[in-house]
Image (cartoon, rainbow, N blue to C red):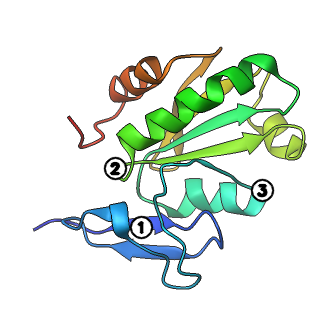
Amino acid sequence: MTRENLVVCTKCGVVNRLPGGRNGTDAKCGKCGALLFSGLPQDVDTANFDRQIGRGSLPVLVDVWAPWCGPCRTMAPAYEAAAKALEPHMRLIKLNSDREQAIAARLGIRGIPTMILFHRQKEIARISGAMSASQIVGWVRGHVSTGTG
């Protein structure tokens, strides 16, 4: 018996139940109709960030970035490529540290880009500095099983 996953919509923040055996690539939010996994990590606000970490059952990778940060902008395409490789077995989101300063402070962000991996409501790993898509995927898979090859 496969267990269901709880997937938080990045658009509206509603928690969706996704049967464990279902391929989530075409799954849509029951409230707003947005794709739950688009392959494009979404920027989230404070409320959505807290729901992603606290209510979803999938591992969550957070890219903490800022628009003025050159390395952050350089890494953005690699982060998107990593999302295409890792979703729908985990959630990838972005957190703009300029707009969401309270969360950045709460997370103890000292430099950007910083990626933080959460699983079961706990931070399990953190790394700073720009990385390639293959480095991101390898780093994540070294910490959690993503169910992908």
Disc on the earlier residue, 1 or 2: 1
Q: Residue under label 2, please give it.
A: 89
Cβ atoms at labels 1 and 2 below 8 Å apart: no
User: SS of the residue at dot 2?
Assistant: loop
At horizontal 53% and vertical 80% (from top left) the residue drawn is 33
Q: Residues within 10 Å of mark 2 (few under 14, many from 20)?
A: many
User: SS of the residue at dot 3?
Assistant: helix
Q: Is residue 110 left or right of residue 136?
A: right
Disc on the earlier residue, 2 or 3: 3
Label ID, residue 46: 3
Q: Residue under label 1, please give it.
A: 6
Q: CA distance from mark 1 to mark 2?
A: 11 Å
Q: Which dot, 1 or 2, sits closer to the camera?
A: 2
Quadrant including the C terminus: top left
Q: Residues within 10 Å of mark 1 (few under 14, many from 20)?
A: some
Look at the picture and state if 104 lies above or below 8: above
Look at the picture and state if 50 lies above or below 74: below
